[in-house]
Every structure is written in structure tokens, then in C-alpha cells.
């Protein structure tokens, strides 16, 4: 059996192609949010001021006011494409399209999103692997450092998974998962961070 006839090569090549395509589209669609060569690993990434329109290809809205800080904002009916081991804001197969419940609880300009995770498959939106599922996301006060969102009061690398105040908010919007969920800040990918 030759190298090019390997059964797994097609799947690997599709994943590499999809990653490259997603990366290229991210740079094209979100040039203001793409780190430059001078961006340090831990540096806050602040996109250039943009207009207040919704980008139809990504359904992401940035509401910037007159200041320099970004206002990351997603619609409450945020569409994602979850298939296999990947999730993203663009996809080819509408069968993979899902609405990720997005709660814009915090309305201030200095906010971002925490993802809500569970081990309960029933009622979840998509899997991130290892028996872990995403059920939604909530906007709270804080800042993105790189692609990771840090709620107010947390420094980089701090464990936010069991923040009682945020989990109380989650309980209001996702009561079915009360006591069965935790949070994480890896949501900057929605904005091309």
C-alpha cells in the first residue's frame, strides 16, 4: 500500500484544507482582529474601529462607540457549524448548522463571552470531545487576552470554571443544567482572535 493510498490521508488532508481555508477567511473577514507580527502572546488585541453593520458571512456585530475599547457582541441566535471534531462560524453543510444560545446578560462595552460546558449530552448544542459538551454562552464584564476571555477580577491563567456569580447567571438561563455545568473563556475564535 503506497503513501498516497493510505485510507486516513484523505481525512487528514480535508482537515488541513478546512483549517487553512478557515484561517484565510478569518484574515480576510476580520483583518482588524488579526494579530500582527508584532503582537505578543499575552497582549490584548483591540480591533480597529469598524462600522456598526452585521457581517452577513459571520453574523457577528461589533458595536463600537467613540472610545478605543472594542465591544464584542454576538446575536442571541448565533449560528455555528459543528461537525465531527470542529466548530466554527462558517460551514458548507447546513446539516451541521446549529443555533448556539447566546445570552447578552452584560450590556456594557467592556464585555465578552464565557462558554458554558456540561457532561450532559442531552440538551447540549455540540461536543468539544472527551464527553464534554457546550450548551451556550453568556456575555459578562471582562477582557480578552489573546483569544481567551477573562471575566472581571480574573488574571490570565486563573481558573474561572466555578465562578459562583457567573454560574448563578447561568442557572437563570439554563436551569436544566443547574449543578451540572462549568464555564470557560475560550471564545475569542468567534471574533478571529
Image: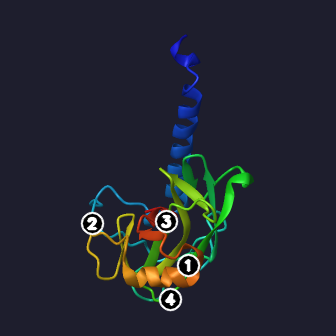
For mark 3, give the secondary structure.
strand
Foreground: disc 3 or disc 1: 3
Disc 3: which residue: 117
Is residue 99 shown left or right of residue 19? right
In the picture, the disc for residue 124 is: none
Q: CA distance from mark 3 to mark 1?
A: 33 Å
Disc 2: which residue: 157
Q: Earlier in the sequence, mark 4 or mark 1?
A: 1
> Which of the colour schemes (rainbow, by chain, secondary structure, one colour) is used?
rainbow
Disc 4: which residue: 107
Q: Position of residue 37 (x, y in %)?
A: 32, 55
Q: Position of residue 125 (x, y in %)?
A: 61, 62
Q: What residue appears at the point 46 percent right and 89 percent down from the top-left corner?
A: 108
Q: What residue appears at the point 45 percent right and 86 percent down from the top-left corner?
A: 109
Q: Residues within 10 Å of mark 1 (few under 14, many from 20)?
A: few
Whether residue 182 is visible to the viewer of this picture, yes or no, is yes
Asked whether the residues under the numbered discs 4 and 1 touch, taking CB atoms below 8 Å apart as contact, a structural biologist would say no
Is residue 192 shown left or right of residue 41? right
Foreground: disc 4 or disc 1: 4
Q: CA distance from mark 4 to mark 3?
A: 22 Å
Disc 1: which residue: 51
Q: Earlier in the sequence, mark 4 or mark 2?
A: 4
Foreground: disc 3 or disc 2: 3
Q: CA distance from mark 4 to mark 1?
A: 18 Å
Amino acid at each position: 500500500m503506497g503513501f498516497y493510498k493510505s485510507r486516513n490521508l484523505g481525512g487528514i488532508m480535508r482537515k488541513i484544507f478546512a483549517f487553512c481555508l478557515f484561517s484565510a477567511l478569518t484574515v480576510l473577514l476580520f483583518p482588524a482582529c488579526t494579530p500582527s507580527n508584532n503582537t505578543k502572546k499575552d497582549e490584548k488585541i483591540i480591533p480597529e474601529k469598524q462600522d456598526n453593520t452585521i457581517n452577513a458571512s459571520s453574523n457577528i456585530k461589533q458595536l463600537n462607540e467613540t472610545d478605543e475599547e472594542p465591544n464584542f457582541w454576538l446575536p442571541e441566535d448565533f449560528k455555528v457549524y459543528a461537525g465531527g471534531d470542529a466548530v466554527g462560524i462558517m460551514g458548507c453543510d447546513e446539516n451541521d448548522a446549529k443555533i448556539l444560545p447566546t445570552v447578552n446578560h452584560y450590556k456594557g462595552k467592556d464585555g465578552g463571552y464565557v462558554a458554558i460546558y456540561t457532561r450532559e449530552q442531552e440538551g447540549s448544542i455540540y461536543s468539544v470531545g472527551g464527553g464534554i459538551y457546550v450548551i451556550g454562552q453568556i456575555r459578562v464584564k471582562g477582557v480578552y487576552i489573546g483569544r481567551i476571555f477573562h471575566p472581571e477580577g480574573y488574571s490570565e491563567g486563573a481558573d474561572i470554571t466555578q465562578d459562583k456569580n457567573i454560574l448563578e447567571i447561568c442557572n437563570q438561563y439554563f436551569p436544566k443544567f443547574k449543578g451540572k455545568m462549568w464555564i470557560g473563556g475560550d471564545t475569542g475564535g468567534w471574533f478571529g482572535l
